[in-house]
Image (cartoon, rainbow, N blue to C red):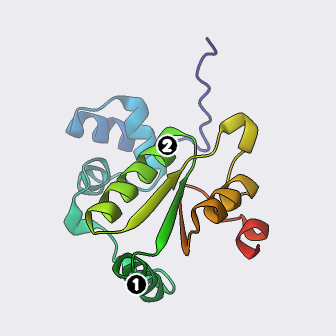
Amino acid sequence: MIPPRWIVTANADPDATRRLAAELRIPDALAAILVQRGLGSPDSAKAFLRPDLERLSDPHRFADMSVAVELLARAVREKRPILVHGDYDVDGQCAAAMLTRVLRSAGGTVHPFVPHRIRDGYDFGSAGLAEAQRVGAKLIITCDCGITANPAVSA
C-alpha cells in the first residue's frame, strides 16, 4: 500500500490552530488546514464542516442556468431521450445514479452512461458521444466530467 502524501502549502498560525482544535475538539492537522483556508473562526469552521441546505449558493447564479432548466424541463415533458454521462469514479457514478433516478421519477426518458476507465478514458469523449447517438439522445447531461470536453461537445 502506498502511504498517503500530504502537501501543506503554508504554515498555519500555531496559536490559531491550537485554539480552533481545542474549541471544536478536532485534530490539530484538521484545524491547521481550516486555518490555512481562512476558516479559523469557530463559526466559519463549523459552517464548513457541517453544511446545511440553507447555506447553499443560489444555483441560478450559474451562467445560463434558466436556459439549462428550460431545456431539461422540455426534454422531460416531451419524453425526449436524455443521456446522463457520469465519470467512472465514485462521485461520478453516484451523481449519474441520482440524476437518473430523479429524472426518471419526474417522467424523463433517461439513459445513464458511465465510461469504462481503461477502454473509454476520462471525460465526455467518443464513447459517450457514441452512446448518445445509439440511444437517440436529444439532451446530454454530464456530471463530474465534461467541462473541458470541447471537441466531443462540438461533435
Q: Is residue 13 visible?
A: no
Q: Which numbered tag is attached to residue 5?
A: none
Q: Is residue 20 left or right of residue 70?
A: left
Amino acid type at mark 2: Ala
Q: Nearer the viewer, residue 59 or 121?
A: 121
* Camera-nearest residue between 129 and 45: 129
In the image, residue 22 above or below residue 61: above
Count of numbered tags: 2
Other residues around mark 2 within 10 Å, as few (<14) / some (14–19) / many (≥20): some
Residue 12 marker = 2
Above or below 139: residue 45: above
Callout 1: 10 Å neighbours few (<14), some, many (20+)?
A: few
Instruction: Name the one closer to the observer, 148 or 101.
Output: 101
Where in the figure is residue 127, as x and y percent of width and height?
71, 52
Residue 63 seen anywhere in this rendered image of the structure: yes
Residue at position x 49%, y 43% from top? 12
Question: Does residue 66 appear to the left or right of 155 in the view shown?
Answer: left
**Is residue 94 shown left or right of residue 43?**
right
Rendering coords of residue 45 (x, y %):
30, 51
Q: Answer with mark 1 or mark 2, whichever residue precedes in sequence.
A: 2
Residue 74 numbered tag: 1
Q: Secondary structure at mark 1?
A: helix
